[in-house]
Image: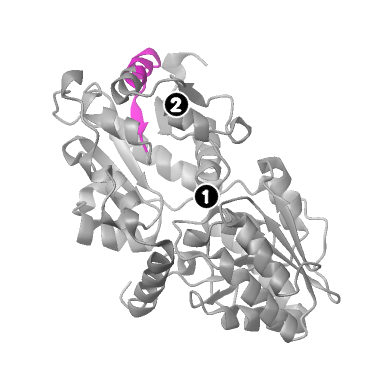
C-alpha cells in the first residue's frame, strides 16, 4: 500500500514480549490496519532489545538502535525513524526513551497516550508533556474518574476506549462443557504476585479440594514467582492436579482456553485484562477479583462470571464449588461470557473507536508547539525512581489490598 493511501502512520511504543500489553498491540494493530492505517510497534535501545521476544511481535515491529545505551543516541534514532516513516501519531506507552523524545518531535506529529493500567507509573506515563498532548485514552471506568480528578486531564482531551479482542481464533470450540467429571480450571498470565496475585492460587485450589471439588488446573505463563508458586502447590499436595505449561506463543492460547471450564484471575490490579477477554471469548466462565471500574465493567456478576473480593480466597473457592455442583449454570454462564465479549469488547468496536479518534485528531490543526533542540534533552524526572521503589513488595501488596477494600464504594 502506497504511503498516500494510508489514513495515517501510527508509532506504537512497545518491545514485544509475553503478556497482555503485547496482546493489546496485536489486536489494536490488526483492527486499525483493516481500516486503512499503518501501525508499527517500535522500541529503542539496548535495554528494550534485551526485553524483546520477537515471537510476540509481527512483521511491522521495529527495534531501533539495539546496541545503543545513551539516551541521546536512542532519542536521535527514534526521531530519525519518525521522519523516514512519515509518522503521524506517536503513542509512547511506557517506553521511557520515546516519552523523552516527545518534546523534540516535529510539530506536525500528534502525541497521544493510552493509560494501560491503574498504577501510578501508568498514570504518570500517560499524562507527561501536557502542552504537547492531543488526547489521553482511558481503557476503563475507573480511569475516567481518576484521570480528571487526580491527574488533571481535561474532559476535552479524554476518551474512553476499552480494549477489544479478535474473537475469530476462539470460534472453533471443540469441547462441550462437562456435565460430569473434573472441572478444567486455567490461569493464563504472568506469574507475578505483585499484580496477578498468583500466590493466592494454592489457597484457592486447596479450598476447592477440601470441598470435594474435582478439578485439573493448567497454569500458563512465566514470571518471577513461578518457583514460589510451584513450591506452594507442592506443599499443599496439589502437584498432581496442577500442570505448569510455561510460556506459550499466541497461537497456542485459543486451544488451551477452549479446553477449560473456568478461568481464574485473582489479580490485585489490571487495566482491561486481555487474558480475561480471551478466556470469555473461549466460553470460559471467569472467577476473578472484583476490581471496581475494571473487572465489573467486563463481567456481569452471576451472569457471565463471578467476581470475588480481592484476596478473599474462600470466595473464589465457593464459586468454583458452586459451578462444580451446578453444571447447567456453568453452561449458561459459559454462553453468556462469550456473548458479553462479542457484544461489548469486539475488535471491530475498538478499531472503530480508535479510527474515529485518530481521524478527528489529524483533522485538527497541530497544537502550537516549537520542538526543543536535542541539546535540551532530559530524561523525564517523573519517571525516575522514588521512595516507592524501595518499599518491600509484600508491604506494597498489603497496601493495595487495603486500599481496594477501603475504597470499593468510592471507585
Q: How many marks?
A: 2
Q: Between residue 260 and residue 305, name the one nearer to us.
A: 260
Q: Are marks 2 and 1 in contact (CB under 8 Å)?
A: no
Q: Label 2's element?
A: helix
Start-end of magenta stretch: 77-92
Residue where numbered disc 2 is placed: 46
Instruction: Tell me which residue sits at (38%, 36%) in the image.
Output: 95
Image x and y of residue 397, in percent: 42, 67
- Residue 97: say if magenta: no
Q: Position of residue 291 (x, y in %)?
A: 44, 69
* Few, some or many residues within 10 Å of mark 2 (<14, 14–19, 20+): some
Above-or-below relation of 404 to 104 = below
Marks 2 and 1, how far apart at CA: 31 Å
Q: Is residue 45 left or right of residue 210?
A: left
Figure quadrant of residue 4: top left
Q: Viewed as shown, does residue 28 lie left or right of 110? A: right
Q: Decide: is 190 above or below 358.
A: below
Residue under pointer 1: 164
The residue lying at 36 percent from left, 71 percent from top is 399
Q: Name the one closer to the observer, 147 or 362.
A: 147
**Quadrant of the rendered image containing residue 215:** bottom right
Q: Which quadrant would the C terminus be assigned to in this image?
A: bottom left
Amino acid at each position: 500500500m502506497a504511503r498516500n493511501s494510508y489514513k495515517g502512520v501510527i508509532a506504537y511504543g512497545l518491545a514485544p514480549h509475553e503478556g497482555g500489553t503485547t496482546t493489546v498491540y496485536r489486536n489494536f494493530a490488526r483492527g486499525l490496519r483493516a481500516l486503512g492505517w499503518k501501525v508499527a510497534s517500535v522500541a529503542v535501545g539496548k535495554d528494550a532489545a534485551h526485553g524483546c521476544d520477537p515471537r510476540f511481535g509481527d512483521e511491522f515491529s521495529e527495534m531501533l538502535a539495539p546496541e545503543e545505551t545513551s539516551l541521546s543516541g536512542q532519542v536521535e534514532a527514534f526521531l530519525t525513524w519518525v521522519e523516514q516513516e512519515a509518522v503521524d501519531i506517536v503513542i509512547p506507552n511506557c517506553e521511557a526513551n520515546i516519552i523523552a523524545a516527545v518534546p523534540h518531535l516535529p510539530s506536525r506529529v500528534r502525541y497521544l497516550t493510552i493509560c494501560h493500567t491503574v498504577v501510578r507509573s501508568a498514570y504518570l506515563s500517560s499524562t507527561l508533556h501536557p502542552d504537547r498532548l492531543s488526547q489521553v485514552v482511558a481503557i476503563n471506568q475507573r480511569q475516567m474518574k481518576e484521570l480528571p480528578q487526580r491527574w488533571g486531564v481535561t474532559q476535552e482531551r479524554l476518551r474512553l476506549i476499552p480494549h477489544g479482542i479478535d474473537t475469530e481464533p476462539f470460534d472453533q470450540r471443540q469441547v462441550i462443557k462437562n456435565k460430569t467429571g473434573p472441572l478444567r480450571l486455567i490461569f493464563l498470565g504472568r506469574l507475578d504476585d505483585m499484580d496477578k496475585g498468583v500466590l493466592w492460587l494454592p489457597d484457592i485450589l486447596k479450598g476447592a479440594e477440601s470441598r470435594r471439588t474435582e478439578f485439573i488446573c493448567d497454569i500458563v505463563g512465566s514470571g518471577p514467582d513461578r518457583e514460589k508458586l510451584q513450591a506452594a502447590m507442592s506443599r499443599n499436595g496439589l502437584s498432581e492436579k496442577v500442570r505448569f505449561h510455561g510460556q506459550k506463543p499466541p497461537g497456542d492460547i485459543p486451544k488451551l482456553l477452549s479446553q477449560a471450564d473456568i478461568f481464574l484471575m485473582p489479580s490485585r490490579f489490571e487495566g482491561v485484562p486481555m487474558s480475561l477477554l480471551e478466556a470469555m471469548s473461549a466460553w470460559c466462565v471467569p472467577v476473578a477479583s472484583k476490581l471496581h471500574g475494571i473487572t465489573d465493567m467486563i463481567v456481569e456478576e452471576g451472569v457471565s462470571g463471578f467476581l470475588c473480593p480481592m484476596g478473599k480466597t474462600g470466595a473464589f473457592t465457593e464459586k468454583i464449588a458452586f459451578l462444580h455442583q451446578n453444571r447447567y449454570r456453568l453452561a449458561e454462564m459459559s454462553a453468556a461470557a462469550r456473548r458479553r465479549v462479542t457484544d461489548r469488547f469486539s475488535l471491530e468496536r475498538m478499531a472503530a473507536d480508535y479510527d474515529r479518534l485518530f481521524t478527528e485528531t489529524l483533522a485538527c490543526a497541530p497544537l502550537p508547539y516549537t520542538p526543543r533542540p536535542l541539546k535540551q534533552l532530559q530524561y523525564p524526572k517523573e519517571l525516575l525512581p522514588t521512595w516507592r521503589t524501595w518499599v518491600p513488595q509484600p508491604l506494597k501488596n498489603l497496601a493495595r489490598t487495603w486500599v481496594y477494600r477501603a475504597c470499593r464504594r468510592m471507585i
